[in-house]
Amino acid sequence: RRWLVFFQDTNALAFLSLAAALGVAVEPGFDVNSLAAPRRAGQAIGAIARLVHEDGEREMTCNVEYNQLNALLRATTFPDGDVADERTGLSPFPGNINQLIVRLAPYVATLEETEGLMPEFVNPKYVDAKERTAFRSPTRLETMMQDLPRCMTEARVGFTQVPAWWCFSPLKNSLDGARAELAKGSPSACAAQAEADFYHGFAE
C-alpha cells in the first residue's frame, strides 16, 4: 500500500476523477495531490494558492479558506482581492474540493512528527455577513483535512484541476441557502443539483 485518499462524502462526483488524479500524482512525484475545480470569484469554497514567505526562500502550495482569501490577497499581491480574471471570468485561484491523494510514507512520517495534531480553525457562519451580529449555526473549533499539506513541510505538494462536471457538486446547502448562492451566480450545492450533476457526469 503506497497511497491514501481522503474524500469528502457529500461530493459523489469526486469518485469519477480520483483515479486520474492518482495517476497525475505519480507522474511528477507528488507526495500530496489536491483535486481542484474551476472556481468563481467569491465562491464559498477554499482556494489553492502558492504562499511565499517574505524571505523569498520558503513557500507552500496549500488551501486558503474562502473567508480568509480576500484579506490575504489584499494584504499581499492582489490589491483588488478575489476578483474574476478578465479572460476566463473565473477566479485565478482554483477551488479546493477537499479530495486529497497522499503518498503513505511521508504521511506516516508526518503523523509520527506531529503525533496526529492538526492546526485548529474557527469558521463562524453569520446570518448577515456584513453586520455579523447573529450566527446562522453554532460555531465550533475545527481541524481540516485540507490543512494536511501545511503539516507536511518537506513534501512535494501539487494539485490537479479538472472540470467541475467531472469532480465537484457537493450536497451542503438547504433550499434557502441554494437560492442565495444562485442569486450570487454560484452553484446551488443542494440535493437537487448534486443528483442532477451526478447523472450528467455519467452521461458525459
Image (spheres, rainbow, N blue to C red):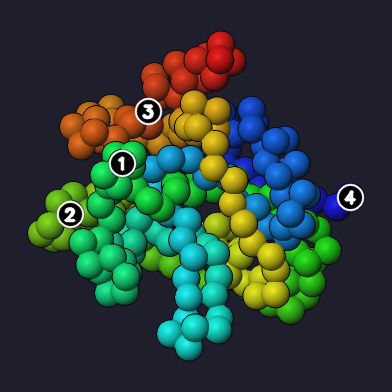
Residue at mark 3: 190
Give the camera-side residue of 96 and 180.
96
- Give the mark nearest the N terminus, 1 or 4: 4
Residue at 59% across, 51% down: 159
- Which of the two discs, 3 and 4, sits closer to the camera? 4
Give the camera-side residue of 88 and 109.
88
Residue at mark 2: 129
- Identified by mark 2, the residue type is Ala
Separation of residues labelled 1 and 4 (CA atoms):
43 Å
Label 4: element kind: loop
The spot of residue 133 in percent (x, y) is: 13, 60
| Tag 2–tag 3 contact (CB < 8 Å) | no
Residue 173 seen: yes
- Identified by mark 4, the residue type is Arg
Separation of residues labelled 3 and 4 (CA atoms):
36 Å
Residue 71 seen: no
Q: Which residue lies furthest to the top in this view?
A: 203
Label 2: element kind: loop
Residue at 59% across, 34% down: 14
| Tag 2–tag 1 contact (CB < 8 Å) | no
Residue at mark 1: 87
Q: Which mark is residue 1?
A: 4
- Identified by mark 3, the residue type is Cys
User: Relative to residue 114, is residue 37 depicted above or below?
Assistant: above
Image quarter in which the C terminus is found: top right
